[in-house]
Image (spheres, helix red, strand yellow):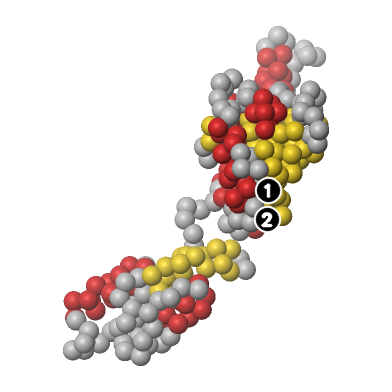
Amino acid sequence: MSHESTIAAISSGPGAARRALIRLSGPLARGITQACCRLSAEPLVLDRRGAARARLDDGTGTQPVLVLWMPAPASFTGEDVVERHLCGSPPLLRAALKRALSLGAVLAQPGEFTRRAFENGRIDLSRAEGVLALVAARNESERRAATALLFGGLSARVDALRAELVGVRALCEASLDFDENETGSIPRDELAIALRELRAGLDEALAWEIAREAPVGLPRAVLVGRPNAGKSSLFNRLTGAAALVSELPGTTRDALHRSWQTPGGEVELWDAAGTDIAGDADVPMQADRLARERARELRA
């Protein structure tokens, strides 16, 4: 499958860094790069796979760049790919990306490089899922599962099982040509054993796939206690939030939540109303009731 458009995107993490990466993929990747990159005294010529140090004209000035040229089909996406390794200054990156877009590239959509790699047969579906899972991994266990998927964990299992199934099928077909008493016949007990082993392998692969799937949403932890027990203060300390803290009971009405990074992974931490807010002239009873009901829902 071929694509007429050339996509470009900043492919490194957000924020300032020592180095950053802009990736281009598509038929114009080489031409765009040669149009804005030069060697010290001559044009940059990308005639064979490799790396070159050059100067990039980003439209506002020049900056040093390391250009990696990977012609089709031997690239991640299966298309002509150029990687530009630049100084990780956000303004410089934005200028370099803007220049590439002005020369004919279009901004890549999330996951589009991986989608093109899949559509062009460079990776299978399980590896494409592994890339996306690795990007979205929130803890070490999810990272390990995504890495196994990315490097062919599921594909290797499926390929091995497919080979076993083809072998069992060949034995079954061969047995049709021979009488049970002839030398070429395969005993049914032997075929049954092979099928049971194949079934066990399928069950194991399915269990592995189910186990590696990330749960929907983050684990939830709710701070529970009497009014003025210090729940909001603890919530602020753990998450860096600014929940209102007061000596008056019933200060917390709306349930607040923030992401909380723990040694075991990311948790959705909630701060809710106290468990037994008493009526008070300064605290309307209707608000008390709604706050308590919301707290009970979160604890359920």
Question: Quick check: marks 2 and 1 in contact, CB under 8 Å?
Answer: yes
| Residue 24 drawn at (x, y percent) | 64, 33
Amino acid on which disc 2 is placed: Ala
Task: Classify 10 Å Cα crowding around label 2: few (below 14), some (14-19), many (20 and above).
Answer: few
293 above or below 79?
below
Amino acid on which disc 1 is placed: Ala
| Residue 114 drawn at (x, y percent) | 60, 35
Query: How far, Cα to Cα, is label 2 from label 1?
Result: 7 Å
Q: Foreground: 126 or 78?
A: 78
Q: Which residue is depicted at the point 43% across and 75% down?
A: 242
Q: Quadrant of the N terminus?
A: top right
Q: Which residue is mark 1?
A: 20
Query: Based on the displayed image, in which of its 4 quarters is residue 26 positioned?
Result: top right
**Residue 187, label in figure:** none
In the structure shown, which secondary structural element does the residue marked by tag 1 occupy? strand
103 above or below 211?
above
Q: Which residue is depicted at the point 19% across and 81% down?
A: 284
In the structure shown, which secondary structural element does the residue marked by tag 2 occupy? strand
Q: Which residue is depicted at the point 47% across and 77% down?
A: 236
| Residue 125 drawn at (x, y percent) | 59, 33
133 above or below 300?
above
Q: Which residue is depicted at the point 32% across and 72% down?
A: 254
Q: Which residue is mark 2?
A: 17
Query: Based on the displayed image, in which of its 4 quarters is residue 295 positioned?
Result: bottom left
Task: Classify 10 Å Cα crowding around label 1: few (below 14), some (14-19), many (20 and above).
Answer: many
Q: How many marks?
A: 2
Residue 165 seen in the current view = no
